[in-house]
Image (spheres, rainbow, N blue to C red):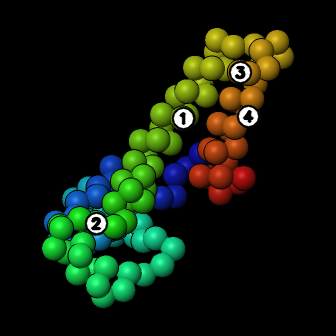
């Protein structure tokens, strides 16, 4: 599978409040925004003020998950290969279910699922 996404690693580095939820490429050749991990709604002004005062990012959880995506993908590919090498899917229902879920997740990431 040819990866069509921005090369990893990706970084979440909330150095300023206006970088809330921003995930950037760590590749020095392409130091741009990869994704914005904003929630389902925008914050009102008072919520923004509270986060600025507390120096917290309301979108941190989303941004951290997105930033981990390249490593999660690689780990899942390795896990599938390992399971396929050591498990008999036709006799182990749990392993078959795990492999099926993992393959579906990889297909979704690759745009074919």
Dot 1 alpha-carbon crowd within 10 angstroms: few under 14, some 14 to 19, many 20 or more: some
Name the N-terminal-most of marks 2 and 4.
Answer: 2
Up/down of 15 relative to 79, above or below? below
Q: Judging from the image, what secondary structure is the residue with disc 4 in? A: helix
Instruction: Find the distance from the CA under tag 2 to the CA under tag 4.
Output: 35 Å
Q: CA distance from mark 1 to mark 2?
A: 28 Å
Q: Residue at x 42, y 59 (%)?
A: 62
Residue linked to disc 2: 57
In screen coordinates, is 6 left or right of 103? left
Which badge, 1 or 2, comes first in the chain's sequence? 2
What residue did someone put label 3 on? 95
Q: Is 82 drawn above or below residue 19 in the view shown?
A: above
Note whether 58 is above or below 91 in the view shown: below
The location of residue 101, given as percent across then percent down, is 69, 37
First-in-chain label (4 vs 1): 1
- The numbered mark, 3 or 1, whose residue comes first in the sequence reads 1
Which marked residue is nearer to the observer: mark 2 or mark 3? 2
Instruction: Identify the residue at horizontal 33%, vertical 49% (top origin).
Output: 9
Q: Mark 3 or 1, which is nearer the eye?
A: 3
Is residue 26 something one can see in this rendering?
yes
Query: Is residue 67 shown to the viewer in this render?
Result: no
According to the image, label 1 marks what residue? 76
The numbered mark, 3 or 4, whose residue comes first in the sequence reads 3
Q: Residue furthest bottom?
A: 45
Query: Which residue ends up furthest to the right in the rendered image?
Result: 90
| Mark 4 and mark 1: Cα distance apart in space | 12 Å
Quickly name the residue at label 4.
Answer: 100
**Picture quadrant where residue 26 is located:** bottom left
Q: Specify whether 87 is left or right of 74.
A: right
Q: Are marks 3 and 1 in contact (CB under 8 Å)?
A: no
Q: Nearer the viewer, mark 1 or mark 2?
A: 2
- Label 1 SS: helix
């Amino acid at each position: 599978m040819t990866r069509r996404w921005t090369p990893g690693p990706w970084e979440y580095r909330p150095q300023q409040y206006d970088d809330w939820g921003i995930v950037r490429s760590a590749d020095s050749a392409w130091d741009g925004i990869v994704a914005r991990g904003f929630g389902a709604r925008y914050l009102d002004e008072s919520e923004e003020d509270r986060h600025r005062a507390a120096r917290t990012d309301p979108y941190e959880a989303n941004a951290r998950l997105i930033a981990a995506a390249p490593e999660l993908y690689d780990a899942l590919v390795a896990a599938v290969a390992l399971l396929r090498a050591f498990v008999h899917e036709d006799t182990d229902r749990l392993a078959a279910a795990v492999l099926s879920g993992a393959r579906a997740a990889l297909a979704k990431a690759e745009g074919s699922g």
